Image (cartoon, rainbow, N blue to C red):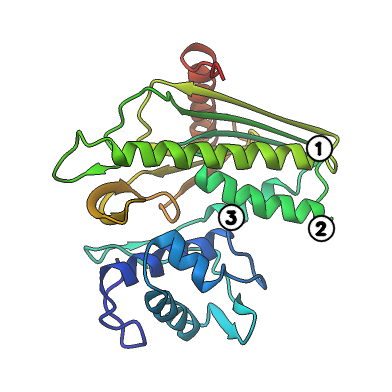
Amino acid sequence: MEAQRSGSGGGGGREFHRILEELRARIADGVYPLRTYLPSQRDLATEFDVSRDTVQRVLRELAEEELVEPRRGSGSRVIKVPRSQRSSTEDGRLRGGPTLGPLLSEAFEHSEVALDVYSLTAESLAAHLTVQAERIVGKYVAPQSIALRLILPSEDLPLPYPRLRDDPADPRLADRLRLISERSMAAVHRMFMSLAEYVPDVSIEVRRAPLTPAFKLYLLNGTQALLAPYEVVPRSIKLDSGEVVDALDVLGFGAPITRLVKDTDPDSPDTLFVESWQRWFNSVWDRVAETPST
């Protein structure tokens, strides 16, 4: 997490720094694009299970960093979006590199958009696709086809995370993850159905594989491979019952991304990297993953 700052966030505590890192990452990733507004304080407090006072301190810190500006009656508007995310972890190491939002935006500027995604859930995918759907509806981009293939873990697969730190067998966090996955997948399906009005050819296919994701993989238009490891981190999670538990979870938004792009040299390291991950995805898709029964 971010080391203590001298600004309004100084001494903010674990939850303050967790939310600050998350919102920074979402701004950098394009989840909240330039000139758009962050969710309301009430919505952010509900999402992160914290008080509005904590959210207000986070927003003041983002304003001091000149990433957002508060507007009375409207909320916090994004005024700067760094293309490369720079944030620090608990041990002080800096993360940096390309971020997913701008790279997806570039992919959607093509006439034919092909996305192959392997992930723990569709939560971050749904958030990023919402931004691209808004661009399509607003006629900022006009792809003629969009094809998404998505591999998620099998629904009956026991996962090592998220879990309670002192009781790995407790099923409550696994149940919570399943609900998040179901809701995000429903959002993605609704989005693709609505895009059929604007894009001539839209398709989505989801399969599930008995694999525990240690990373998320995005293959964009057959030319780019984006690979981000799931870093296991301790954090507090508030359950629907109101109980706050100490958990081990993984970073989704804001995870550092390795990006390589195919070039004209078939033997270059970048081309071989992209092609090897495309072959891996195709092999799991064709030989391991299965279409859900419902």
Q: CA distance from mark 2 to mark 1?
A: 14 Å
243 on left or right of 185: left
**Residue lying furthest left in this view?**
166
Picture quarter with the N terminus: bottom left
Looking at the image, residue 212 lies above or below residue 19: above
Going by the numbered disc 2, the residue's amino acid type is: Gly
Residue 252 at what x, y percent from top left?
42, 49
Amino acid under disc 3: Gly
Query: Pointer 1: residues within 10 angstroms few (<14), some, or many (20+)?
Result: some
Q: CA distance from mark 3 to mark 1?
A: 22 Å
285 over 125 or under it: above or below: above
Q: Give the label on residue 101, or none.
A: 3
Element under disc 2: loop
Nearer to me, 74 or 207: 74
Q: Is residue 178 above or below residue 48?
A: above
Residue 39, image x, y percentages: 56, 67
Task: Identify which residue is drawn at 26% across, 68% down.
Answer: 14
- Pointer 1: what residue? 196
The residue located at (57%, 20%) in the rendering is 294
Disc 1 marks a residue whose amino acid type is Ala
Q: Is residue 98 left or right of residue 17?
A: right
Question: Of 56 and 103, which appears nearest the observer?
Answer: 56
**Badge 3 or badge 1: first in the primary sequence:** 3
Residue 113 in percent (x, y) is at 72, 38
Q: Secondary structure at mark 1?
A: loop
Asked if labels 1 and 2 touch by Cβ distance under 8 angstroms, the answer is no
- For the residues bearing labels 2 and 3, Cβ distance under 8 angstroms: no
Image disc number at residue 138? 2
Q: Most extreme residue toward the front, as rendered? A: 241
Of circles 2 and 3, which is in front? 2
Dot 3 falls on a residue whose secondary structure is helix
For the point 26% across and 51% down, which residue is it?
233
